[in-house]
């Protein structure tokens, strides 16, 4: 299995109001029809209405009319999708990692006339994913692996874009929280864990498409295939990274499994129930190809909500700590230790000086419940402990010597790394922040590129891929003739005009191209 992650209510938000946007939800409705009609067409022997369709004479096939119940289900899909997509965002994260020479945007043959003056160092590596707004004043939940590069831009459903602050990340659950400077945003609320059962309908919503966002607001339908899947995806990834190995033992992997289609770029988007609530955050698929083969996984909503609250309040996760090494009970364990069923967690070792040691837990104990809630496997116990606060006292149901007893434990605090958020991008000059490298329009360049003597301004030497300038169609070889209606005669003058633009404000540049064509482009200055 290959990891292809690629994630309560918000503290200040509330649920949004449904409105019709059927164009967005065609995928969900078609998927629902494909899944519902075979079942709906069956009568008592399972073949009545299906046989009616198959036995039609040659010619166009017609389907039986939908029943009222079937129409209600399909209508519900559309209502939920139309509501939920408003709160789903597209995310890009950037990390400077490679020199411009490897990825220059210069057209063929232009490089000799631009030289080193036109280089922007370093060029960014860009990753993408999805997220969901959980508070009306701008908090967004996504996957930690989506924003681990730093420098994050968020696109809303209404096509506005914002530079986002990374409030905090928790690699042990693959959850991150962002914040954007906006108010009155649509939000989704979290579902309670008891509201989700195997077989329930869910929608997986994402907004993939780094750069152009061509697949924004993708909706797919499926059912909950399983809950509590202990996949060990996060811990395996941490063990492969020397900087993350110390966290591997704290990874909480108790995923929701769904057959709703999830593909790269949907990471961090919500898995939504039929009430329009967040049932989980899509984080991974199991596939040897990197594309969906029927197994998708999401972090459960209650776990996400707890991590989110810690990150918003403290900037880090304050993880409760028990202090044991454990394994899930097997059939042989159950027989040897005289357990009534094959369920629970076998204590393999107790950390000296830990809360577990202070409470008297020992090797060979089997933990079968936490606070009265049954514990079936190791991942279940990790999740139960993680959702409690350090210093909280919990009652563990423990099987020892064939008898069940209650053990009271005051939980400690896990020593996780204090700094978890990715580094912020270093400040850049305004032109560079827009993705532009500017140079002088020298006589040699003017002649080689094809500009007449009447054209003056700042020559665009290079454009960073996926930058604001690139997205608006600016290409190397173009000339900035004016900024906000004021003519410019040199790169320094253009940079000065751009430097007067406030972060977050929109500026307009008049651009010239060889041959005399001109065009106007508007750009928002990154914060």
Image (spheres, helix red, strand yellow):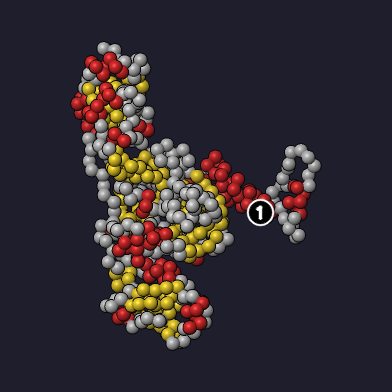
Q: Is residue 166 above or below residue 318?
A: above
For the residue pair 69 and 103, the one nearer the viewer reads as 103
Label 1: which secondary element: helix
Q: Would residue 263 be found to the left or right of residue 72 on screen?
A: left
Q: Quadrant of residue 305?
A: bottom left
For the residue pair 68 and 334, the one nearer the viewer reads as 334
Residue 316 visible (yes or no): yes
Q: Position of residue 42 (x, y in %)?
A: 72, 55
Q: Position of residue 443 (x, y in %)?
A: 23, 15
**Label 1 CA crowd tier, 10 Å (few <14, some 14–19, many 20+):** few
Name the residue rendered at 78%, 44% in the picture.
56
Q: Quadrant of the C terminus?
A: top left
Name the residue rendered at 31%, 35% in the picture.
102
Q: Is residue 21 above or below residue 175?
A: above
For the residue pair 87 and 147, the one nearer the viewer reads as 147
The residue indicated by pointer 1 is 69
Q: Position of residue 287 (x, y in %)?
A: 49, 53
Q: Would residue 49 be found to the left or right of residue 24 on screen?
A: right
Q: How many marks?
A: 1
Name the residue rendered at 28%, 42% in the picture.
96
Name the residue rendered at 31%, 50% in the picture.
166
For the residue pair 423 and 191, the one nearer the viewer reads as 423
Residue 485 visible (yes or no): no
Q: Would residue 168 be found to the left or right of residue 89 on screen?
A: left
Q: Position of residue 340 (x, y in %)?
A: 52, 82
Q: Outermost residue toward the top?
A: 453
């Amino acid at each position: 299995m290959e990891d292809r992650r690629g994630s309560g209510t918000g503290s200040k938000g509330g649920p949004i109001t449904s409105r019709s946007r059927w164009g967005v939800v065609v995928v969900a409705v078609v998927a629902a029809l494909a899944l519902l009609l075979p079942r709906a067409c069956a009568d008592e022997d399972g073949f009545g209405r299906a046989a009616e369709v198959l036995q039609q004479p040659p010619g166009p096939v017609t389907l039986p009319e939908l029943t009222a119940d079937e129409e209600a289900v399909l209508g519900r899909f559309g209502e939920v999708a139309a509501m939920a997509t408003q709160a789903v965002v597209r995310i890009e994260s950037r990390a400077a990692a490679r020199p411009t020479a490897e990825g220059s945007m210069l057209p063929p043959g232009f490089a000799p006339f631009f030289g080193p003056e036109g280089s922007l160092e370093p060029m960014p590596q860009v990753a993408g994913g999805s997220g969901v707004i959980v508070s009306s004043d701008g908090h967004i939940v996504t996957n930690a692996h989506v924003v681990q590069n730093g420098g994050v831009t968020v696109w809303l459903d209404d096509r506005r874009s914002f530079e986002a602050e990374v409030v905090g990340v928790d690699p042990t659950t693959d959850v991150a929280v962002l914040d954007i400077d906006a108010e009155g945003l649509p939000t989704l609320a979290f579902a309670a864990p008891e509201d989700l059962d195997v077989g329930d309908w869910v929608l997986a919503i994402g907004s993939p498409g780094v750069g152009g966002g061509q697949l924004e607001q993708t909706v797919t339908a499926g059912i909950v295939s399983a809950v509590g899947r202990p996949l060990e995806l996060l811990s395996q990834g941490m063990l492969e990274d020397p900087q993350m190995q110390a966290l591997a033992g704290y990874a909480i992997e108790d995923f929701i499994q769904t057959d709703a289609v999830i593909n790269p770029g949907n990471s961090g988007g919500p898995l939504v129930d039929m009430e329009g609530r967040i049932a989980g955050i899509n984080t991974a698929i199991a596939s040897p190809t990197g594309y969906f083969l029927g197994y998708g996984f999401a972090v459960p909503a209650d776990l996400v909500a707890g991590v989110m609250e810690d990150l918003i309040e403290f900037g880090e996760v304050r993880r409760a700590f028990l202090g044991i090494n454990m394994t899930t009970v097997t059939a042989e364990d159950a027989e040897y230790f005289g357990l009534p069923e094959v369920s629970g967690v076998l204590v393999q070792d107790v950390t000296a000086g830990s809360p577990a040691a202070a409470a008297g837990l020992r090797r060979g104990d089997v933990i079968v419940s936490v606070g009265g809630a049954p514990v079936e496997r190791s991942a279940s116990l990790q999740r139960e402990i993680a959702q409690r606060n350090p210093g909280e006292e919990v009652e563990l149901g423990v099987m020892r010597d064939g008898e069940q007893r209650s053990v009271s434990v005051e939980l400690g605090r896990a020593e996780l790394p204090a700094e978890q958020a990715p580094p912020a991008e270093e400040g850049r000059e305004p032109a560079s922040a827009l993705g532009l490298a500017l140079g002088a329009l020298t006589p040699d360049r003017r002649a080689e590129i094809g500009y007449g003597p009447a054209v003056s301004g700042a020559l665009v030497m290079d454009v960073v891929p996926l930058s604001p300038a690139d997205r608006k169609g600016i290409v190397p070889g173009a000339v900035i003739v004016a900024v906000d209606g004021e003519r410019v005669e040199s790169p320094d003058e253009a940079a000065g005009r751009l430097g007067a633009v406030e972060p977050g404000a929109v500026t307009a540049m008049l651009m010239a191209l060889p041959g005399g064509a001109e065009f106007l482009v508007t750009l928002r200055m990154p914060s």
